[in-house]
Image: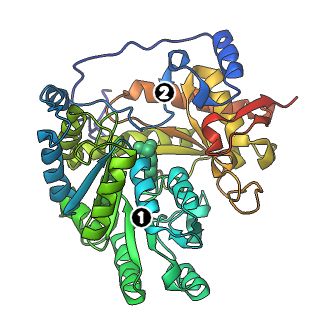
Amino acid sequence: MSKKIVKRSWAEPFKIKVVEQIKMTTRAVREKAIKEAGYNTFLLRSQDVYIDLLTDSGTNAMSDNQWAGMMIGDEAYAGSRNFYTLWDNVKKYYGMPYFVPTHQGRAAEHIIAQILVKPGDYIPGNMYFTTTRLHQELAGGTFVDIIIDEAHDPQKIHPFKGNVDLNKLDALVKKVGAKNIPYVCIAGPVNMAGGQPVSMANINELSVYCAKHGIKMWFDATRAVENAYFIKLREKGFADKTIAQILKEMLKPFDGLWVSAKKDLMVNIGGIFATRNKKVFDEARNLCVVYEGLHTYGGLAGRDMEAMARGMDEMVDFDTIKARIGQVEYCGNKLKEYGVPIVEPIGGHAVFLDAKKFLPHIKQIEFPAQALTAEIYLDSGVRGMERGIVSAGRNAKTGENNFPKLELVRLTFPRRVYTQAHIDVTVESVASVYENRKSIKGLKMIYEPKYLRFFQGRFEKLK
Ligand SMILES: *Cc1c(COP(=O)(O)O)cnc(C)c1O
C-alpha cells in the first residue's frame, strides 16, 4: 500500500546561494584539540569544529540583499548615510526616537550602566545575562533576580517562563527603596533560562507597578522578535497581529533598550542603544565618543550599519522567525524521542540540555555541563556551550561560587546556516553520548580569569 499523507511539512523561506566548506575531523584530532583548549569549547579553533552550535551571535547567514547593502557602505567618518538609514529603522521597528550605534550589545550595556547605575544601587532583572550583569556590577550596582520560580525548574511547563514575579520586585522595593533602583532590566526571551519569553500581560503589569513607584524600565531587546513570535503564538489576542506590531507594543513601556545586532538582525557585528529619554541620549552619545567612536558610527563601518538596517527589515518577517524557531523545536523534539533531558518548553534560539539530569553522578562543583559540552564535541565535532556554574561565576561581594539551579549545555542555532541533516547528525551524537553517560567524568578548573570566566577558563579531566 502506498503511504497516506498525515501532515504537510513547512520549509525555510529561502534557498542557498553561497556555501562554505566545513571539515569533519577524527576522534584522535578532537581529543588533542579539546585537551589543548582546556576542555573549554570557547578555546577551540573553529577549523576543528564540524557543526558549530556555540552561539547564534554574529554567526548568521546574511541575505543577498544585506550583502548588496555592504557595497553601498558610506565610510565617511562623520554623518554616514547608512547611519541615518539605520536610525530611521530603529524608530520604525523599536519605536524609540533616539539612537546611538555601538560595536556590540555589551558596549551598549556598558554605556547604560555607566549613565544610570550608582555605587550601592540595585538592578532587578528577569534572570541575569553574563555581560549585562557584569556591567551593572562594574558600575557599583547589585543585580537581583526577580524572575518567576518556574524559570529555575527545567522541566516545569509554563508558556512565559521569562515573566517577572512582582512580589519579588515589591519585596526588593520595600527593602532598599525605589530611589536605589535606577531601572528594572527586562530581557525577552531570557537567554539563561533557556530562551523563555516574557508575556505582554506581564510587561503591562510591571509597567503599572513601575509607574506607581517611579522606576524606569529598560529592555534587552537582543532577541525581541523571538519574544514577539511567542506572544503571537501563545498569548490571547495577538494571533492576528504582525510581529512588527507586537514588537512595538512590547517596547512601549520602556524608557530605552539595547540590542546585540549579532542576533535578531542577522549580521556578523553591531549593537544598538536606543531611548525615548533625550537626557540619557545626550549622555550616551557623549560616552560613545569615549569608548566606541563618533556617534554616527559607534565602532562600526558604514557597510555594517547598512547590513543591520536591512537585517531589521528581514527580522520581522513571520516566516523567517518561524523557520528559525521551528528548527530549534525540531532538534528539541528529536532529542526528547531519545529520552535526553532538555529544558522545556523548548526555547527560541537554542536547545538546552539539562546536565544535572544527564549526569547525576557528577557534583555541580565538578562542572557537569562543562564536561558534557566537551564530551559532545569529542563524539562528533559538534560545539555547544556551558550555561551553568562556570557561566554563573562568583558572588561579587563574597567571592564564593554561585551555584545556579540550572546547569545546562546550550546548543544554539545560527540563523539560516544549518540544514535539517545537520540537526539530525547533532541529535544522534547527543543521544549517543547519553547512552554512554555513565562513563563521563567531571572536571577540575585549573585557570580562572577574573571576569566572565566561562570564556577563558581552563579545565582538566578528573580521574
Ligand atoms: C549576546 C547578548 C548580549 C551581549 O551582546 P554582544 O553583542 O555579544 O556584546 C546581551 N544580552 C543578551 C540577551 C545576549 O544574548
Residue drawn 67% across and 51% down? 393
Q: Residue at x 27, y 63 (%)?
A: 282
Q: Position of residue 139 (x, y in %)?
A: 54, 61
* Quadrant in which residue 148 is drawn: bottom right
Does the numbered disc 2 mark a residue whose Cβ is under 8 Å from ligand 1?
Answer: no
Residue at the image position 24 percent from the left and 72 percent from the top: 237
Are the residues tagged 2 and 1 within 8 Å (C-beta)? no
Question: SS at mark 1?
Answer: helix
Q: Position of residue 232 (x, y in %)?
A: 28, 62
Inspect this view and state whether residue 384 appears: yes
Judge whether 147 appears above or below 347 on screen.
below
Quick one: 416 or 40, which is closer to the camera? 40
Rendered location of residue 336, percent (x, y): 55, 43
The 10 Å Cα crowd at callout 1, few under 14, some 14 to 19, many 20 or more, is some
What secondary structure is marked by label 2?
strand
Q: Which residue is mark 1?
A: 115
* Residue behind mark 2: 52
Q: Is mark 1 within 8 Å of ligand 1?
A: no
Residue 348 image label: none
User: Residue 65 vs residue 442: left or right?
Assistant: left
What residue sits 71% from the left and 48% below the top? 356
Asked whether the viewer can see residue 227, the reply is no
Q: In the shown orientation, is residue 71 left or right of residue 26?
A: left
